[in-house]
Amino acid sequence: MFAVPAVLLLFERKWRFVLAFFSVYLAAALGFDYLKTMDVGRVGSLAVSTMMVVSHMMPITIVLYYVMMSTKVNEFLAAMARMHVPTKLTIPLTVMIRFFPTVFDEARAIGHAMRMRGIRLFSLHTLKNPFSILEYRLVPLLVSITKIGDELSIAAVTRGLSPETRRSCVATIGFHVQDVIVFVYCMAVVACLVIASRAKQSIVDIISALFS
Amino acid sequence: MNITLKNVSFSYSDSLDDAVIKDLNLEIRSGECVILAGESGCGKTTISKMINGLIPHYHSGTMGGDVLLGDKNTADMTLAEISRYVGSVFQNPRSQFFNIDTDSEIAFGCENQGMPREEILQRVEGVVKEFRLEHLMGRNIFHLSGGEKQKIACASVAATGPEIFVLDEPSANLDLKSVADLTEIVARWKKAGKTVVVVEHRIHYLRKIADRICYVKDGRIAYEWTPAELEAKGAEYAANLGLRCVNLEQLKEMGDARLRGYDKKGVVASRDTAKQSLNETILFTDLHFAYNRKFPILDIPTLTLPRSQITALIGHNGAGKSTLAQVLCGLCGRWRQKRKARKYGTYLIMQDVNHQLFTESVLEEVLLGMRPQNEKAALEILAGLNLEQYAYEHPMALSGGQKQRVAIGSGVSSGRDIVVFDEPTSGLDYRQMLAVSATLQKLAASGKTLLVITHDPEFILNCCSNIIRMEHGKIAEQYPLQGNQDKLIESMLNV
């Protein structure tokens, strides 16, 4: 499954990003596969479970990243309208697309402020109060993003975004060959996984592990 | 299209007893440009929200009276309908965009109205040409400067062709060059016969365009002038009403009267101590930063700051002022540079102070960076900033000015000698600006060295003693303010 977002990201020229994530993913997946049957002790099992989470969650996060990065708000709205998804659902989703980059922007500024205050991830202070670091990060972030969220919705409603009116769209969207290829590939992988779990055959297991 | 406000009252709570707007009447004729001026919290923004329909459709509260656009009552229209007649531009350029790229943003309003695709493309093209935005098309909104963002905001509102424009402190975060562009945009709208309502306490950039200035006080319109009438009353008069200077040229003649409305005792004392250490300077070397080696953003071999004084850092957007501040504070640059910066002991007060307040109480905020922690000393620092009565309050519950002082307190407590401010007075009215200026002067008098990034000429004349002007990542010139007031204003106006 990792292949889909990786290839799509390559189209967006994110070579380094793909390489970094692919190696982390591969290391985690192989490590987990190799170690899962061994007795590794308490610390080891923590590492193994981390590997499992990384190898399972990473493809999903990468897909999410790709969607956030490459989808324009108006294209998304138009595509959803074409699929007859109600606007009551799509408008909150678009706000989310717009929201994530803002959150990262804010988080970076807060990180700067923390560094200047000498608050680091690993220090005597944070070792004594491990939750304080979470609080320092989250309190200013929450305050500023609630304010920004409010201002964003004001900007949207004063520009006439509303569930009642029908929107038009400048962008041309459609379902093309590329989409068919991606769709078929995903279906095939899912089918492989289903067969593998049914038959529990080791060969299919290996093949699907390679592609997943 | 006329705007009529008839006996309007509004309160953000359930009863009209604590109304923000009290029985207000205002008639704005078609094609007029009206400024709603007044101090922060006087209700001028609330009036603008009544015109663009956010009241009563978005903000909850109690409203009395009628707001008419032409002959239609806004209470009977939906926000989507109102948005066809009224276009709104807001103060904060960072959060008024719904799209991530400039093209879609300009088309956004038209799309919401369901215009056909060809017409939208035509309108976008027209607006881009009119506002000369060719170089900004296809860009990521997050990579634009404040002035560029505000231009895109104006263009995207103009694309739908509303009859009325409502601008809420549009100049608050802009440098004087971007403000001049804004003047041009408003002038163009007025010429096209549009009705423009601007909420502002900076009037200078609209003094040749505006027909009327309505001064709002305690939810009522207290005075009405033409810009010429207000200008004739003099700078002192405007300052007493909390308004910023009507004509920047007037600032030149002010000389020593520039400390109007402020207790001069403390300042004179601080000047004396400043004189003693006049010749002492702090030297920074090798301040460089670049994303790409061929195009350095910052290239300063040496920078000298006079000790225990306030130095203003000016220059237009993108000249590298903020980068300089970040490099000085060790927030960007190479690892070695950062380690060196930590030795300088610089502290940055950010433009958005919300980013740097982390803890649950004001006292804790000051204690956090203190080594060793000493509650008594922390309380003393707070007393120096007039914050002792808030020591146990949550920082986020304070007002903007108080938050800024808490951030200053945390910088002082961490024992840094140099404090850098990033636009501490953006969006402040005259009285608030004086308060900030007083705090800064006190800080300098206590021996701290201050560097202030600012676009605010009134503020510089009020408290700074030295000027550094940056251009293309380099220091273009450095001079003392004394005797150079004219030069400063000229260079700020002609950026």
Image: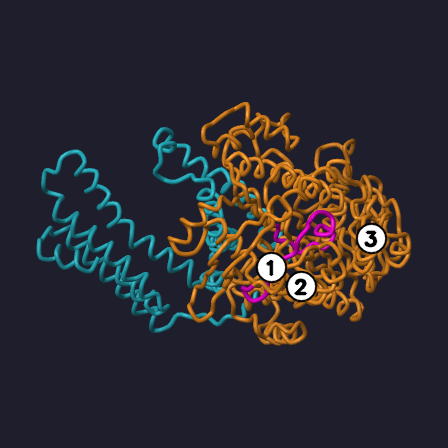
Q: CA distance from mark 2 to mark 3?
A: 25 Å
- Residue B420 vs residue A29, the one in the foreground: B420
Mark 1 and 3 residues: CB-CB less than 8 Å, in contact? no
Labelled pair 1, 2 in contact (Cβ < 8 Å): yes
**Which element type, helix, strand or loop, lies under badge 2?**
helix
Q: Nearer the viewer, residue B339 or B277?
A: B277
> According to the rendering, which colour does chain A have?
cyan
What is the spatial separation of the Cα atoms under label 1 and label 2, in whole angstroms? 9 Å
- Residue at 35% x, 32% y: name it: A124
- Asked if the residue under mark 3 is in contact with the one under mark 2, i.e. CB atoms within 8 Å, the reply is no
Which residues make up the magenta segment? Answer: B452-474
> What residue is shown with label 3?
B254
Residue B102 in sight here: yes
Q: Which residue is mark 2?
A: B178
Same chain letter for marks 1 and 2? yes
- The colour applied to the residues of chain B in this rendering is orange
Q: Give the residue type that dot 1 points to.
A: Gly
Q: Residues within 10 Å of mark 3 (few under 14, many from 20)?
A: some
Q: Amino acid at mark 3?
A: Met
Chain ID, mark 2: B
Residue identifier under label 1: B146
Q: Quadrant of residue A185?
A: bottom left
Q: Is residue B70 visible?
A: no
| Amino acid on which disc 2 is placed | Ser
Closer to us: B136 or B45 = B136
**Figure quadrant of the N terminus of chain A:** bottom left
Above or below: residue B101 compared with residue B284: below
Residue B483 in the image: x percent, y percent? 75, 57
User: How far, Cα to Cα, is label 1 from label 3?
Assistant: 30 Å
